[in-house]
Amino acid sequence: AQSVTQPDIHITVSEGASLELRCNYSYGATPYLFWYVQSPGQGLQLLLKYFSGDTLVQGIKGFEAEFKRSQSSFNLRKPSVHWSDAAEYFCAVGVENTDKLIFGTGTRLQVFP
Amino acid sequence: GAVVSQHPSRVICKSGTSVKIECRSLDFQATTMFWYRQFPKQSLMLMATSNEGSKATYEQGVEKDKFLINHASLTLSTLTVTSAHPEDSSFYICSASLLAVEQFFGPGTRLTVL
């Protein structure tokens, strides 16, 4: 069965520092992969997605993610974090032959000034 | 584009009453709509998938008689929590699918049952 793992429950970084949020998936074929961000009490906003093609994907708000098939990973990165990036980040994978998504457990990002 | 709204954003009700939550795709016709439930500091749990004009498909463990879903049009789906109890208090999020797999999420509805 497909699954998504986000190993880091909580990450704290200083403003201006670089960021990498980890995501590992379990899926036999090429997956559809997503990163979403959720601010407290809000819905989810799509940061970026990977369906096929270039394995380095650019998203909104300066985020990027790299699909690495050999490592079954789709890590999210940002070179310089802003205080407004503090939020919950969810990685998700599309379920084969359906419209469903499977979400990871999320990583809470805290940013210190 | 691809905006999804939910109404209400917050609702407080008494135990035993029913609550209806609306989910609308504002600028596109959604082939499929999804309803999720999210407990504090947890991930999203898919409750059901609905397509316009057909019965919703519920995930295992979700009571279909308690969580009634109606998908009346390509832009509107409703979730009714019947005979709500305090354990139904949660954050409910809907999403709408424009193309296969990609989903656009609403802002969520905070339900508190007293």
Image (tube, coloured by chain):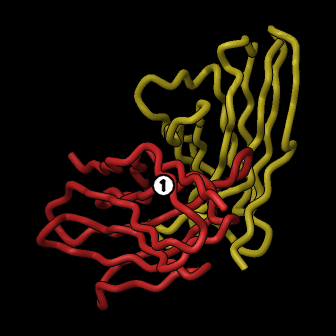
Chain colours: A red, B yellow
Residue at point 87%, 12% (across, down): B14
Residue at point 72%, 49% (across, down): B77
The image position of residue B49, as x and y in percent, is: 53, 46
Viewer-closest of B46 and B63: B46
- Pointer 1 residue: A90
Please tell me whether residue B38 is drawn above or below residue B32 in the rendered image.
above
The chain under label 1 reads A
Residue A100 seen in the figure: yes
The image position of residue B106, as x and y in percent, is: 71, 56
Q: Amino acid at mark 1?
A: Phe
Quarter occupied by the N terminus of chain A: top left
Residue at point 42%, 49% (across, down): A103
Viewer-closest of B77 and B1: B1
B113 lies left or right of A112: right
The image position of residue B84, as x and y in percent, is: 75, 15
Count of marks placed on residues = 1
Residue at point 47%, 65% (across, down): A35
Viewer-closest of B15 and A34: A34
In which image quadrant can residue B26 be found?
bottom right
